[in-house]
């Protein structure tokens, strides 16, 4: 992938990264990875409530992939998103956020009528599984597609290195959380991977990783670092 690209990038199967040019980043300098999952006659947007994504979303819509839903992996996107009004004005789309995050102040302030992504009929029809992964926030979720040997859109439940972090060794990290949540979170990840084949992990921030690029053994090491390594340093590491 190319950070801060002005173009839509094909990553895995039907998943595209929307343009990042103009993306802001937090203290670690990792730009936001916003995604579109292409389906027959529409798309599902993932973590894309940002003005710098609008042109890319419009291009997809012009090509027959207008957005049917915007899925938020957790409540923090409610505070940072600056294009909710524009997206809901332009497109007839649903905005999905887990109920455990819907009562958070940043979610309430959007004044959006959120829908529950778990068992949502559009996601189920499109073959998109919602995996609940509380820890970063109470309502954090991941999205899983079985096609292309398994694609996992991880939200903030996994973080890759960005353009300001060393790319070698390749690694994914978990976010910081309290000790009890951390124990549950670290047990949930290997259980998830035992139950579902995964060939690509697409985080909200930082480098995406594909088994085809790293080889099977190295890919497993990258994933295992989520629960065996130290949490990500939010101050910049």
Image (cartoon, helix red, strand yellow):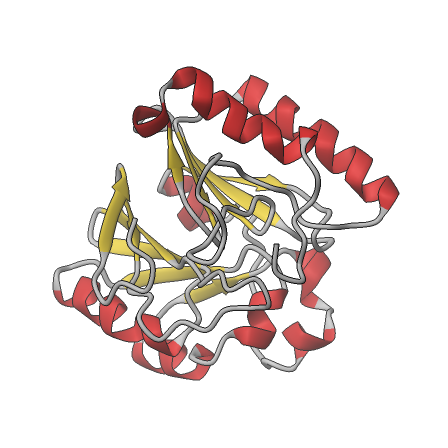
- Nearer the observer, 212 or 72: 212
Figure check: 93 above or below 10:
below
Instruction: Report x, y in % for residue 7.
Output: 21, 62
Of all residues, the one furthest to the right in this rendering is 180
The answer to whether 71 appears left or right of 52 in the picture is right
The residue that appears at 57% across and 62% down in the rendered structure is: 28
Question: Which quarter of the rendering shows the C terminus?
Answer: bottom right
**In this picture, residue 234 sits left or right of residue 13:** right
Q: Residue furthest left?
A: 63
Residue 204 or 220: which is nearer the viewer?
220
Nearer the observer, 73 or 162: 162
Residue 113 seen in the figure: no
Seen in the image, is 185 located left or right of residue 52? right
Q: Give the number of callouts.
A: 0
Query: Residue 33, percent across and down?
Result: 41, 57
Q: Is residue 10 visible?
A: yes
Rendered view: 11 above or below 165: above
Residue ID at (45%, 62%): 32
| Quarter of the view holding residue 150 | top left
Q: Quadrant of residue 214?
A: top left
Residue visible at 50% across and 75% down in the picture? 81
Q: Which x, y percent locates residue 18?
A: 30, 60
From the top left corner, tell me how far across and down residue 66 is, in percent: 24, 63
Q: Is residue 187 above or below residue 44?
A: above
Question: Taking 160 as reference, is 147 left or right?
Answer: left
């Amino acid at each position: 992938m190319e950070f801060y690209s002005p173009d839509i990038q094909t990553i895995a199967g039907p998943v595209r990264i929307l343009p990042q040019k103009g993306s802001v980043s937090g203290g670690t300098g990792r730009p936001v990875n916003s995604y579109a999952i292409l389906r027959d006659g529409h798309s599902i947007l993932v973590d894309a409530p940002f003005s710098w994504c609008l042109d890319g979303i419009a291009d997809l819509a012009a090509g027959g992939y207008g957005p049917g839903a915007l899925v938020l992996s957790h409540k923090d996107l409610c505070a940072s998103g600056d294009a909710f009004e524009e997206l809901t004005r332009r497109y007839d789309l649903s905005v999905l956020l887990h109920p455990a995050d819907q009562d958070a102040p940043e979610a309430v302030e959007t004044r959006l009528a959120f829908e529950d992504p778990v068992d949502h009929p559009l996601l189920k029809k499109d073959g998109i599984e919602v995996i609940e992964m509380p820890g970063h926030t109470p309502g954090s979720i991941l999205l899983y597609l079985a096609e292309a040997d398994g694609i996992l859109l991880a939200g903030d439940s996994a973080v890759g290195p960005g353009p300001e972090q060393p790319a070698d060794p390749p690694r994914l990290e978990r976010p910081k959380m309290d000790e009890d949540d951390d124990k549950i979170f670290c047990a949930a990840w290997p259980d998830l991977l035992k139950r579902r084949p995964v060939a690509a992990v697409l985080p909200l921030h930082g480098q995406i990783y594909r088994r085809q690029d790293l080889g099977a053994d190295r890919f497993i090491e990258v994933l295992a670092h989520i629960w065996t390594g130290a949490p990500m340093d939010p101050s910049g590491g």
